[in-house]
Image (cartoon, rainbow, N blue to C red):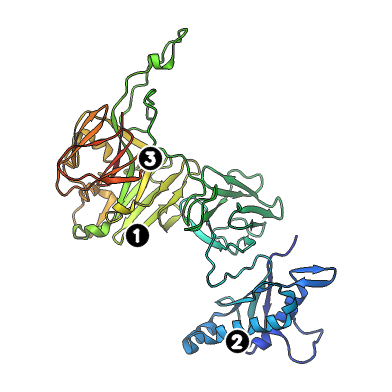
Amino acid sequence: MPIYVQHEVLGRLPDVFNAEAIWQAPGLALFARRPLLRDLLERCPREQRGHAATRCFTHVTLRLPQEDVDDDYHLTRGNRARDLAQTLAALHQKDFGDLLGTDQVRYHVSGGDDLQPGEIEVRFGHAVYLPGPDEKVLFQVSASTDAAAWKPVCPVYPDQRLAVIDEASAPGWPFGAAGTLLLINDGPDAQPVLQVRPKGALDCRLDERQGCYVVTRPGETQGRRLLLKIARAVGRPALQPFVEPVMRPAVQPPAVWQPRAPSRPVIDDGTALPQPPARAAEARPGATDATFAPGARQRLTLAALALPRLSRYRNTGAASLSVPFDRTLAIAPAGDSALTFVVDANDTLHAVTPAGQQPVSAPATFAPSGERSIRLLAAPSQMAERYCALVPLPVPVAAPVTQGSFGRGGPALATLRVLDTPRLLARDDAAAPASPDRIGLSRSAFAFDASPAGLSITRQSATQALYHLDAELGFVGAIDGAEPFVLPPGHHVVAGHYVLRFDA
């Protein structure tokens, strides 16, 4: 198997910032001496024909003892480290100019706590890449062991051909030195490929439903696994399946909030109110499904939750808001949770799982049980002043509607207010427990009257913010004034934390 990263530790250097001492020993070459950087590059060419080198590696990383790097920063603001990189690049250009072609020579100097005084770690090879000053990231690779807490692995740049992912680079890598993963990048217009090296050392498959690669030991189905997500950076044209930025899914799961066909109503298993099963139609010659379909059922469905910016409510003493989900990704306000989204007083989002807590940003996808997934979407820009994210519910909650009102004081639709539990809202020590619904939801937010044409909505509180979203949760407009507003079937109204869809 080829060596993708050449690695060597050079020792016994009196001055780790002396470029000439790192590059080549003075005087005649001695067979017994330890090879220095020039010798290493010469012995390990990038390409060769026979025994003659035709190209050499041009990207080199150096790690110096951290104490020396810190002293350089304190005394010279890092000038010695910059001079070291520039001098080594000049020596590289001088001695290997005929083997460079159009490649640029790049050096990078950093520090490491694991190095002893007088030691330098050198790395170069096919999978060592240093980006140019104006080069933008093409992909971001992140890893997780539970599909909830994702940690960065490495960026991938447009001109970077290879990247090695192993125990040294992937947080939570559970396989030791059993094998490595090789990411192959054929450019901005090509799909990145992930391969196992050596072949067969690990099992690696793309789970399109979760939008990530699943890596396991061969033959193990219940053992430890590692999830790897390759997400396209912001501003890059989309490729399938990697269409979204850092902490986003590589594959978009189907939207669970899309309106169902009105010609054949479907019983929603995730509703809070049990629905009687529709009576099966008897088979008769020439009969169609439409002949025996029951009438349309009008209802309001809690399709998503809108996570508020708690910074707007500092005077209430609100410190954090928790939104827990069980293993089926149903709202679990009173039971054990497999995944909890937390918004703190500074509007920072966190994902909490049994494995720990991780700051997250929208958009992102989570699959804590490895089966059903849940998405975290950025709030529409027109609502960003009040909300930091939207969470479409994999298990919606529904209630039949005809006429009434929605708000903290409306008992008819209380089943839709799934966050009406004081323990979900943490407050300052001096503050008394209170329901999260007191943040952003009036006692009577709006009155409604259902009809086949839509849901007539009349705002009942002058301070209540109401928003109209389309069937795809796209922003349509704010619902202002005292005049009735007709919400079309399949569209959403946002009131407080709740994103309600009208189904007819």
The answer to whether 243 appears left or right of 333 in the picture is right
* Residue drawn at 62 percent across, 68 percent down: 129
Q: What element carries label 3?
A: loop
When the figure is inspected, residue 326 is found, relative to residue 28, above or below; the finding is above
**Residue at mark 1:** 348
Q: Along the horizontal axis of the image, is 144 left or right of 202?
A: left
Give 63 or 352, whichever is nearer the viewer.
63
Q: Distance between the residues labelled 3 and 1?
A: 23 Å
Q: Looking at the image, tell me whether mark 3 or mark 1 is earlier in sequence order.
A: 3
Q: Can residue 159 be seen from the camera position used here?
A: yes
Please report whichever mark, 3 or 2, sits nearer to the chain's N-terminal start: 2
Dot 1: within a 10 Å radius of its alpha carbon, few (fewer than 14), some, or many (20 or more) residues? some
- At label 1, the amino acid type is Thr
Q: Is residue 44 left or right of residue 457?
A: right
Dot 2 falls on a residue whose secondary structure is loop
Residue 97, quarter of the rendered image: bottom right
Instruction: Identify residue for label 2.
Output: 17
What is the number of the mark on residue 449?
A: none
- Tag 3 residue: 330
Relative to residue 107, is residue 400 depicted above or below?
above
Question: In the image, 262: left or right of 219?
Answer: left
Residue 462 is situated, as x and y percent measured from the top left of the image, at 14, 47
User: Which comes sooner in the sequence, label 1 or label 2?
Assistant: 2
Say how many tags the image has.
3
- Residue 117 visible in the snapshot: no
Indicate which label's residue lies in the foreground, 3 or 2: 2
At 36% from the left edge and 56% from the top edge, which residue is drawn? 349
Work out which quarter of the rendered image holds the N terminus and state it.
bottom right
Above or below — where is 403 with respect to 327?
Answer: above
Observer-nearest of 383 and 416: 383
Q: Is mark 1 on a helix, strand or loop?
A: loop
